[in-house]
Amino acid sequence: MKAIQSTIEKQELVKIDKFSGLLVPQKYKPLLDLTKTELAILKIKDFFQTNLSFELSLTRVSAPLIVKSGTGINDQLNGIEKPVSFKIKAMNEMKVEIVQSLAKWKRMRLADYQFKAGHGLYTDMNAIRPDEELDSIHSLYVDQWDWERVISVGDRNLKFLKSIVETIYSTIVRTEKYVSFLYSQIKPILPDKIHFIHTEELEKLYPKLTPKEREYQITKKYGAVFVIGIGSDLKNGQPHDGRSPDYDDWSSINNQKGYKGLNGDILVYYPILDIALELSSMGIRVDPNSLKAQLEIRGCTERKELLFHKKLLNGKLPLSIGGGIGQSRLCMFFLRKAHIGEIQTSIWPMETREQCKKLNIFLL
């Protein structure tokens, strides 16, 4: 890590344009050209998903791009993002939505495929998030591996959550070493182990900082961190970050200290942009009791009447753990890119494209 950090420290980080919140290196030079980058993306995706599916006993399944509105299957994410929707003429003007993620859809598919505890599925999730704030790591287009695995009642605890996080993180570390083997100019920078910390511990450690500033400080210190308990209110009356009430369990007590939450984010320190980069959001999913509690907390108990929620409350869906792992984010990290647009094709303001080109950042 020191070699890369020393290189970045000599470069001034500059703002791309008025639309972007993140800075990029002023003297950036990509380690791979466009053609080699495209080939590397393919190799990374193949290697990572093969290893992940083996380690977690996951079977690949096909995923929808659109789902029917009003079923509760699509995700509200933080609860404020509006999905892209339209009506289908051939189906009596039925309203449908482009997916924002597949957290609830996956759980229904676990039941359909009748997976047993310890086994599950993964899929390529492609989504459009029109309310996303665009910057170097956020795009209108979202691509991730969405995975879900059946668990037992005895698995709904912090120890089990940590074991799954460690398995996923070890796959990330292994993939970075594979990329370094393929491209000798890319050196591994990830630590062998991931550090765990609860959002309440993080608040105590950095009481005067914002949640994002806390993430930056702790991730820069340890290199890789899993922040536990995202969604429930902290001592200051605000959550570390928003979470929808109907997939991750962020309200259950997880230890003797009274900390809440069986979910979290995998963050890594990214020296190219000098940020804490979120690679995955995941968690043990709500059971009927925690779903009821979280709907009450968020003031949206009317969702109990939706298809997904009825199935869960009536015991028709298996207990599960799951999450999403950003494909473009992961490739961006491994290939030491300065902008996510160097990995995926999306729409960017013309000013962004022009300024990026001046900085040797070639957006696809």
Image (cartoon, helix red, strand yellow):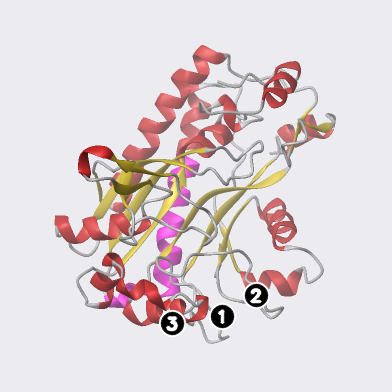
Q: Quadrant of residue 234?
A: bottom right
Is residue 103 found inside the magenta-colored segment of the image?
no
In magenta, the rendered stretch is: 153-174
- Which one is earlier in the sequence, the residue at label 2 or at label 1? 2
List the residue tagged with mark 2. 200
Q: Is residue 291 above or below residue 258?
A: above
The amino acid beneath tag 1 is Tyr
- Which one is earlier in the sequence, the residue at label 3 or at label 1? 1
Mainly helix, strand or loop, the magenta region?
helix
The amino acid beneath tag 2 is Glu
Secondary structure of the residue carrying tag 2 is: helix
Q: Residue at x 22, y 76 (%)?
A: 315
Q: Is residue 161 above or below residue 67?
A: below
Q: Nearer the viewer, residue 173 or 227?
A: 227
Q: Residue at x 53, y 87 (%)?
A: 256
**Dot 2 and dot 1 residues touching (CB under 8 Å):** yes
Q: Which numbered tag is attached to residue 259?
A: 1
Estimate the x, y position of residue 362 in percent, counting from the top left: 63, 18
Q: Quadrant of residue 351?
A: top right
**Dot 3 and dot 1 residues touching (CB under 8 Å):** no
- Which one is earlier in the sequence, the residue at label 3 or at label 2? 2
- Disc 3 from disc 1: Cα separation: 16 Å
How packed mark 2 is, by other alpha carbons closer than 10 Å (few <14, some 14-19, many 20 or more), is: many
Secondary structure of the residue carrying tag 1 is: loop
The amino acid beneath tag 3 is Ala
The quadrant of the image that shows the N terminus is top right
Say which of marks 3 and 1 sits in front.
3
- Disc 3 from disc 2: Cα separation: 20 Å
Q: Nearer the viewer, residue 38 or 362?
A: 362
List the residue tagged with mark 3. 293
